[in-house]
Image (cartoon, grey):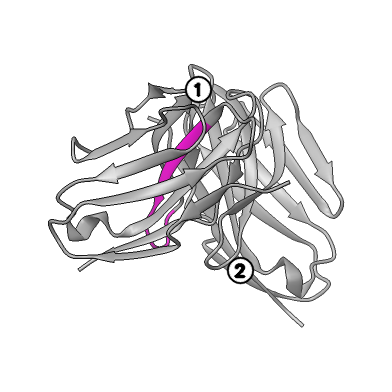
Amino acid sequence: KQEVTQIPAALSVPEGENLVLNCSFTDSAIYNLQWFRQDPGKGLTSLLLIQSSQREQTSGRLNASLDKSSGRSTLYIAASQPGDSATYLCAVRRGDNFNKFYFGSGTKLNVKP
Amino acid sequence: GAGVSQTPSNKVTEKGKYVELRCDPISGHTALYWYRQSLGQGPEFLIYFQGTGAADDSGLPNDRFFAVRPEGSVSTLKIQRTERGDSAVYLCASSDQGATDTQYFGPGTRLTVL
């Protein structure tokens, strides 16, 4: 069974800092990996999707990397802003079963003004 | 265009009662997913529809849970004889290609079983 772990569980940083969120998964036979943002009381918003053949994806101040062989992904946020405060979730799709996403428990980020 | 919508946003019920949760996916999306999210946890897969059929229902915890999508659009998640442990946020997502495309999530229904 695929297990997805996110470290740290919570993170508080001052505005302007660059930061890295970590995601690890136990089964490297993934189809793709996706990073989401969740605001309190809201659904999930997709940030970046990385196919298993890719090493990284970038969108604005966000950069996600994938090392499938070691079972790791990182989400890099540059020049953090208070509006970045949210819970960040990573999810992997297995290569042998596209239907399921396996989610981590998330990292709760607080960016202080 | 409109995103994924879910109704009701909150549902409080008593143990043993029956509940229905509704999901309206993005128009034209053929794939629809239900997830359950407990406090402090990531979403947990329940069921996946491709069109009208349940292509994968392996995440449903037991036979008290059932979902339908009769016309390939709106879906209803049905929970019989609710238990306190069913309390969670139920999320719905849709995508237009299933396996490869991004899932778009609704705001969820918060279910509380007293």
In x, y percent, where is residue B47? 39, 33
Residue A11 has which mark?
A: 2
Work out whether residue B60 can be spotted.
no
Which residue appears at 72% of the width and 42% of the height?
A: A48
Name above or below for residue B112 compared with residue A105. Answer: below
Q: Residue furthest top?
A: A96
The chain that hosts pointer 2 is: A
* Secondary structure mainly formed by the magenta segment: strand
Q: Secondary structure at mark 1?
A: loop
Res. A56 image quadrant = top right
Q: Marks 1 and 2: in contact by CB < 8 Å?
A: no
In reply to whether residue B39 is colored magenta, the answer given is yes
Mark 1 closeness class: few <14, some 14–19, many ≥20 residues within 10 Å: some
Residue B51 has which mark?
A: 1
Q: Could you tell me the amino acid type at mark 1?
A: Gly
Q: Nearer the viewer, residue A97 or B36?
A: B36
Highlighted magenta segment, given as a residue range? B32-41
Mark 2 closeness class: few <14, some 14–19, many ≥20 residues within 10 Å: some
Q: Secondary structure at mark 2?
A: strand
Q: Could you tell me the amino acid type at mark 2?
A: Leu
Name above or below for residue B96 compared with residue B83. Answer: above
Residue A90 has which mark?
A: none
In reply to whether residue A76 is colored magenta, the answer given is no
Which residue appears at 42% of the width and 44% of the height?
A: B35
Which residue appears at 79% of the width and 38% of the height?
A: A57
Disc 2 with disc 1 on a shared chain: no
The chain that hosts pointer 1 is: B
Question: What is the quadrant of the C terminus of chain B in the image?
Answer: bottom left
Res. A51 image quadrant = top right
Name above or below for residue A28 compared with residue B90. Answer: above
